[in-house]
Image (tube, rainbow, N blue to C red):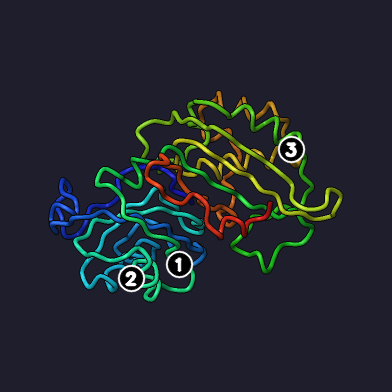
Amino acid sequence: MQDDTPGLEAPSAFAPADQNSSELTGATRRVALGVSYLGCTYKGWQSQPGGGTVQDALEAALSEFATKRIKVMCAGRTDAGVHGINQVVHLDTDIDRAPFSWVRGTNTYLPKDIAVQWAAEVPAHFHARNSALGRRYTYVLLEAAVRPALETGRAGWVFRPLDLDAMQAAAQHLIGEHDFSSFRSSMCQSPTPVKELREIRIRRCGPPHAPSAYWRFDFEGKAFLHHMIRNIMGCLIMVGTGVQPASWVLEVLHARDRKVAAPTFSPDGLYFFGPRYDAAFGLPEQIPGQDWLPS
């Protein structure tokens, strides 16, 4: 399950819901961090009472480094099993540290499957979630006769051949602003099912006639509903394997009914590629982990 909804994060345990950390600590600066993580062993991004989430691990490491409690706000929440390549968070602090100190110091206390990639001081009006102009996700899929082993948790899998032209035709029906109720989880917290999907790019990676291949599906939009991408993936794969025609996706979209769509696809190959911000903030949009994905 994936939570892409840019909704409110849980309030700090140390703060009333209508106050932020800078108001309580007298913080003089806001710091943004780019974070990568492998989501296989975590219960998703958002902090939970029982722990076990990426946010829990990151905040614990930041608090150790800063020697005081640190809370963060992220650009886009991800659910259990979903990975982050350039997740962006911000925090408020009164600590004066160089950006490389936030990176190296925090990473000292993080597990090996989570790492801060960069840090930058940002203006007080910057907000990791609300300042985002768009969000990008990538789904990596293995088409092979035999299930994966090394790629387990890092790539989805289909054993039937996929039709690129059919999937591209189906994807075009979803571009633009639509009511995506048919692709929305019942647990979605978004106040509206209407979202703008700006782009879906699909490509088969590797030799064109190889018996197996990686596929890459790139999605970009302003915001996404809970499970929206995984539900779209389920429909695209039904089209790609010939179970449904490309026009069926338009029927699903117009139905505005989750029950008519394909089952939610696996979280294994889903990556939060990263948000986009105004260039004036000067934040990195490209990091090495993005080049690791098949292309």
Secondary structure, mark 1, is strand
Place of residue 196 in the rendered image (x, y in percent of width and height, measured from the top left): 48, 30
Q: Nearer the viewer, residue 106 or 272?
A: 106
Task: Classify 10 Å Cα crowding around label 2: few (below 14), some (14-19), many (20 and above).
Answer: many
**Rendered position, 71 above or below 217:** below
Q: Residue at x 67, y 55 (%)?
A: 294
Q: Are marks 2 and 1 in contact (CB under 8 Å)?
A: yes
Left or right of 176: which side holds 128?
left
Res 259 → quadrant: top right
Q: The residue under label 3 is which amino acid type?
A: Val
Q: Are marks 3 and 1 in contact (CB under 8 Å)?
A: no
Residue designated by label 3: 243
Secondary structure, mark 2, is helix
Q: The residue under label 1 is which amino acid type?
A: Ile
| Of marks 3 and 1, the one in the foreground | 1
Place of residue 253 in the rendered image (x, y in percent of width and height, measured from the top left): 56, 27
Q: Nearer the viewer, residue 243 or 294?
A: 294
Res 192 → quadrant: top left
In the image, which disc is placed on residue 114?
Answer: 1
Left or right of 223: which side holds 247?
right
Left or right of 54: which side holds 170?
right
Mark 3 → mark 1, Cα distance in angstroms: 38 Å
Task: Classify 10 Å Cα crowding around label 1: few (below 14), some (14-19), many (20 and above).
Answer: many
In the image, which disc is placed on residue 61?
Answer: 2
